[in-house]
Image: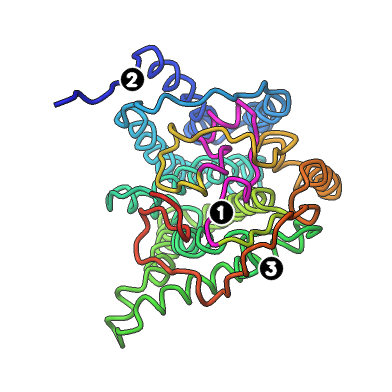
Amino acid sequence: MEAAATANPSSVARTWASHLLCFVLPVTTLAFAATGPHIWWQAPLFLLPLLASVVIDMTSRPEHRQPDPNLPPAPFDAILYVLVALQVVNILLTARMISQAGLFTLDTPVAMLLVGVNSGYSAIVVGHELIHRASPFMQMLGRLLMVTTMYEHFCTEHVRGHHARVGTDADPATARFGESFHRFFHRTVPAQFLSAWDIENRRLADHRGLALWRRHRVVQGKIAEWGLAAAILLVFGPAAFIVHLGQAFHAIAALEAVNYFEHWGLRRTSRKVRPMDSWDTDSRFTLYTLVGLSRHADHHAYAARPYQQLRHWEESAKLPFGYFGMVLLVWTRNELVRRMLTAELRRRKMGPFAQIAVAPEEPVPASQFPVHAGFGAAVEAGAPA
């Protein structure tokens, strides 16, 4: 019997060490929360790594190398487990710090921004990775991370809704060509919740009464979210409760900024999701600080592929900067972002500028998009696992 192929040890070490960049923000947040309350001039200093990340990301060299297909999963999964623990510790230490400092100090706005951005870039990104895994335990950890950001219904809508409907008008998380972030945010947040609610109602169509609510994942998520928020209120007081909600808002705003540019202006006419249906960035810094999220084209084409195995696709549209820089520009210079993305679509003849040589497949009605019962599979219509 032929022995299974093994990865080159130096390749494993290099890739694993590169992914340790994902600890920059969580460790900065841990240092901030563990050392507070702070003197007024100390708190803003903890924002410097965040600002540095934006600068480095916008000037980062590209990363086109493909991963070793035989990388062992264990060391890369260990990174995810540590990040889960850091998020839980950071949320609790932040609540403790604010309960001691009070609401009216510089620790409050810094906590809302730093902890919130970390929750978006670390907790939600890691949670996104975990809910795509086959292991029920890893899926549970992914849901726990989303609970800390008050957005647990994302787990249902993203895997069983967004992945099946991406690039179509049926998908609330796909930004339309020309759509501003302000308009997208106010459209997508309620629409994603309603989509998750509808998906769960259909999954549990045969259940009634108490059995329905006990098994309803969206209901479970809301109970867990507000249970955590209520516990923070009772144990650490109203100031900590307000900051917890504030960091969750910033995390959601970061997530939806990412959703905004990951599919902006792209529409698919085929049933199968292709790498050309998502935006990528070549930024090396984004790739290794956000556990492979930047290779979004490969993720949507092969959703079960773990983060360390995601591949570069030259065929996908390319963002002008990495995710750190793009989120900041989406928040502050959205018109500029739309001009840059439009120019890229025009250059590549994609989106509204596509030149279709043959008749496209007949668009698939929204009612025919599959709704999948589990979190951990490759859920796109027709996508290989």
Amino acid at circle 1: Ala
Left or right of 182 in this view: 15? left
Badge 2 is on which residue? Answer: 7
Badge 3 is on which residue? Answer: 187
The Cα–Cα distance between marks 3 and 2, rounded to whole angstroms, is: 45 Å
Amino acid at circle 2: Ala
Residue 74 image position (x, y, % from top left)? 29, 30
Identity of the residue furthest to the bottom in this view? 209
SS for callout 3: helix
Q: Which mark is residue 261?
A: none
Residue 114 image position (x, y, % from top left)? 60, 39
Q: Marks 2 and 1: in contact by CB < 8 Å?
A: no
Q: Is residue 273 within the magenta segment?
A: yes
Could you classify mark 2 by the number of other residues whose Cα lies within 10 Å: few (under 14), some (14-19), or many (20 or more)? few
Of callouts 1 and 3, which one flags the residue occurring earlier in the amino acid sequence? 3
Of callouts 3 and 2, which one flags the residue occurring earlier in the amino acid sequence? 2
Could you classify mark 1 by the number of other residues whose Cα lies within 10 Å: few (under 14), some (14-19), or many (20 or more)? many
**Relative to 158, is 55 above or below?**
above
Report if residue 42 is visible in the image: no
Residue depicted at x 31% and y 50%: 134
Residue 370 image position (x, y, % from top left)? 45, 69
Residue depicted at x 45% and y 65%: 226
Of callouts 1 and 2, which one flags the residue occurring earlier in the amino acid sequence? 2
For the record, the magenta segment spans 271-298
Badge 1 is on which residue? Answer: 248
**Relative to 253, is 45 above or below?**
above
Could you classify mark 3 by the number of other residues whose Cα lies within 10 Å: few (under 14), some (14-19), or many (20 or more)? some
- Judging from the image, the colouring scheme is rainbow
Amino acid at circle 3: Arg
Residue 125 image position (x, y, % from top left)? 50, 44
Q: Is residue 308 within the magenta segment?
A: no
